[in-house]
Image (cartoon, coloured by chain):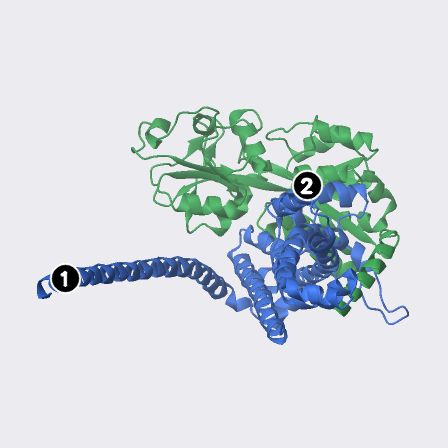
């Protein structure tokens, strides 16, 4: 008995040792991968932080209110961002109003209504492809279609529509992702109590997926705000020392659409112009503008995360 | 989201309704200018002052001389900035659209050849030597190959990209044909990148507009240029450009005014007169070289006469005098 258990015990022990070595090795692999991942993350973050800190350090003399309330000027000291940030804001409004209804509607249709056949597949592939098309292509399309084809001119409307088209695929894809995340049981429950398709979509699908949709919309918008190439192609200006007509008036109907056809400039174009100037003082302005664009983007993305968290918290399946 | 969605839909409908008459509302007087990014700082300065003085709205773009002429010949702009004269195909486009233009030289720019501060061997360069370095297919890769007296140092070349008017003028002046250049140099559309390139490379050589040298004198050294081997080398400076001794790299800059706008829009006429009146002061302020006073007087008379056309035969020309140019159109 004794003689037969000893080898058995030994083999169990050696097995145990083998298992322990294996666990140790796996744990070590874990640590190695975690450190590689962390280094990669740090490198990416460090680059961004370095860039941002560098811009802030270069541009900090310009961080004051007059920088936002002054028009561009040949004197770097008195040159400001007023026409650029107002232009960016108005263009973003048009972009939002075109990309969101169209993108959400298209996403909902593709996910909820479209028959599953080769044609839908084709559309799906194309939408995903569109998200990767270089932005300059959208600029060229807009130049032919909006500026000359539809004769909208080099206006805020043209720029807004162009950027709207640019982020449309992002909105569609994120809408579909968000809708797909809703459990089938929710839909089936609604159908079971006799809801129509539209009731299911409007009362449940849209309601539960709005966090995801909103995130996609904001990420799309924060991409649009930094775009330069398509805006230059459609002919944004550089020196413009007056503001478009106000969208709100004091006489009925209190809304004014003249601003849509006004010429404009946007933040990244103003930054590009200042950067290409010979005088160093303009480079300070450019750095400040760069820091502001990054801040706005960070703020928008932060809002997206916060909204998603807030909305998810309120949903109980 | 539901209500937000409905609201957006409603506003989109309103947007669509307003789409039908986007141009009908542009009653405000706006002078539209686009074109060369080289001329941009001058026109920007004039536009800024003019808008302050008269409250007339002026917009200036910088899509480049070529794109500027495209818009100009479609009748979209009143004035086009140009760092080179109008070319034959642009003249044809304008003619086809029935657009006539008045050609006005407004300033000079001195293309400046620069080297690194550590470079103490080059005292001057002749156009022949520049040609030897920059001609298409040139095999010069070392300073020793430029001149046997120079040290054995690698030559690193920096220059503007092929879309630039500076590139066109320099190649015309040095290689005899616009756009013909060796291609194995570091190009950039941003002159500040060229400044960095030359200042960071002991064997560096590059060329760009005078304003960029003026701002970076502490990092770069400008090279005096002689038009022919043996003729005196001239350092680029506002004085040398003005008296005509800095040749052949001094080039005139232009604005082209839509003749119909000049005749029928009083604000455009006022703007151009204001431009020529204030050019001597404003051109110098943005670091370009003003024309001599008598040339401005001649250009003013030329504008007053409203004689359309170009003094160039649809191609660039090196070393032309402003007076001769105006006499040609007369």
Precedes in sequence: disc 1 or disc 2: 1
Residue A288 in view (yes/no): yes
A15 left or right of B299 in image: left
Q: Tell me the colour chain B is drawn in.
A: green
Chain letter for the part of the structure drawn in blue: A
Instruction: For marks 1 and 2, give the CA distance.
Output: 63 Å
Determine the residue positioned at 79% across, 65% down.
B6
Q: Please give the label number shown on residue A181.
A: none
Decide: few, some or many residues near mark 1? Use Cα within 10 Å; few <14, some 14-19, many ≥20. Answer: few
Look at the numbered disc 2 and give the secondary structure of its residue: helix
Q: Please give the label number shown on residue A10.
A: 1
- Count of labels in the image: 2
Q: Is residue A251 above or below residue A41?
A: below
Q: Please give the label number shown on residue A118.
A: 2
Determine the residue positioned at 40% across, 46% down.
B199
Q: Seen from this angle, which residue lies furthest left? A: A3
Image quadrant in which the C terminus of chain A is located: bottom right
Pinpoint residue B83: horizontal percent, then vertical percent: 64, 39
Q: Seen from this angle, which residue lies furthest right? A: A252
Determine the residue positioned at 32% across, 29% down.
B144
Pinpoint residue A36: horizontal percent, then vertical percent: 35, 57
The chain ID associated with circle 2 is A
Of residues A17 and A257, which is closer to you in this image? A17
């Amino acid at each position: 008995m004794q003689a037969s258990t000893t080898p058995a015990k030994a083999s169990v022990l050696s097995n145990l040792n083998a298992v322990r070595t294996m666990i140790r090795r796996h744990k070590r692999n874990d640590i190695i991968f975690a450190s590689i991942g962390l280094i990669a993350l740090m490198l990416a973050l460090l680059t961004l932080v370095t860039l941002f800190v560098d811009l802030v350090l270069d541009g900090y003399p310009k961080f004051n209110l007059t920088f936002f309330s002054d028009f561009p000027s040949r004197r770097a000291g008195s040159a400001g961002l007023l026409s650029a940030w107002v232009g960016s804001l108005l263009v973003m409004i048009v972009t939002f109003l075109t990309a969101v209804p169209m993108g959400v509607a298209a996403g909902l249709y593709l996910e909820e209504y479209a028959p599953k056949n080769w044609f839908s597949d084709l559309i799906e592939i194309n939408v995903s492809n569109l998200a990767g098309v270089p932005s300059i292509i959208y600029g060229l399309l807009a130049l032919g279609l909006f500026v000359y084809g539809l004769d909208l001119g080099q206006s805020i409307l043209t720029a807004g529509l162009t950027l709207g088209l640019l982020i449309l695929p992002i909105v569609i894809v994120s809408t579909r992702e968000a809708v797909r995340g809703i459990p089938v049981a929710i839909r089936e429950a609604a159908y079971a109590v006799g809801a129509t398709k539209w009731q299911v979509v409007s009362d449940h699908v849209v309601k539960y997926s709005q966090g995801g949709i909103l995130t996609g919309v904001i990420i799309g918008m924060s991409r649009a705000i930094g775009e330069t190439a398509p805006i230059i192609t459609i002919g944004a200006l550089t020196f413009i020392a007056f503001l478009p007509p106000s969208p709100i008036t004091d006489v009925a109907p209190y809304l004014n659409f003249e601003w849509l056809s006004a010429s404009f400039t946007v933040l990244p174009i103003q930054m590009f112009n200042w950067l290409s100037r010979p005088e160093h003082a303009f480079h300070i302005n450019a750095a400040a503008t760069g820091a502001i664009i990054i801040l706005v983007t960070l703020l928008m993305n932060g809002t997206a995360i916060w909204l998603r968290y807030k909305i998810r918290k309120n949903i109980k399946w | 989201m539901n209500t937000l969605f409905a609201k957006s839909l409603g506003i989109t409908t309103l947007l669509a309704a307003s789409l039908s008459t986007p141009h009908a509302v542009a009653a405000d007087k706006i002078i539209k200018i686009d074109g060369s990014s080289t001329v941009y700082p001058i026109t920007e300065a004039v536009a800024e002052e003019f808008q302050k003085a008269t409250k007339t709205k002026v917009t200036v773009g910088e899509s480049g001389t070529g794109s500027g002429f495209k818009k100009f010949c479609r009748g979209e702009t009143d004035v086009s900035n140009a760092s080179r004269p109008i070319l034959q195909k642009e003249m044809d486009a304008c003619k086809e659209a029935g657009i006539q233009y008045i050609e006005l030289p407004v300033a000079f720019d001195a293309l400046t050849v620069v080297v690194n501060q550590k470079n103490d061997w080059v005292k001057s360069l002749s156009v022949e030597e520049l040609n030897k370095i920059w001609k298409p297919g040139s095999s010069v890769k070392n300073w020793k190959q430029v001149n046997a007296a120079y040290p054995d140092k690698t030559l690193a070349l920096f220059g503007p990209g092929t879309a630039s008017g500076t590139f066109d003028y320099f190649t015309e002046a040095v290689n005899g044909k616009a756009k013909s250049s060796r291609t194995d140099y570091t190009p950039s559309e941003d002159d500040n990148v060229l400044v960095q390139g030359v200042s960071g490379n002991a064997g560096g050589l590059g060329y760009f507009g005078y304003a960029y040298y003026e701002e970076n004198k502490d990092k770069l050294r400008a090279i005096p240029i002689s038009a022919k081997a043996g003729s005196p080398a001239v350092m680029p400076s506002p004085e040398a450009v003005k008296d005509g001794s800095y040749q052949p790299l001094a080039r005139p800059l232009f604005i082209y005014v839509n003749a119909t706008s000049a005749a029928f829009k009083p604000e455009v006429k006022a703007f151009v007169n204001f431009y020529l009146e204030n050019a001597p002061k404003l051109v110098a302020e943005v670091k370009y070289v003003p024309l001599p006073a008598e040339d401005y007087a001649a250009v003013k008379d030329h504008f007053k006469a409203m004689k359309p056309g170009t003094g160039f035969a649809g191609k660039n020309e090196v070393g032309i005098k402003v007076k001769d140019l105006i006499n040609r159109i007369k």
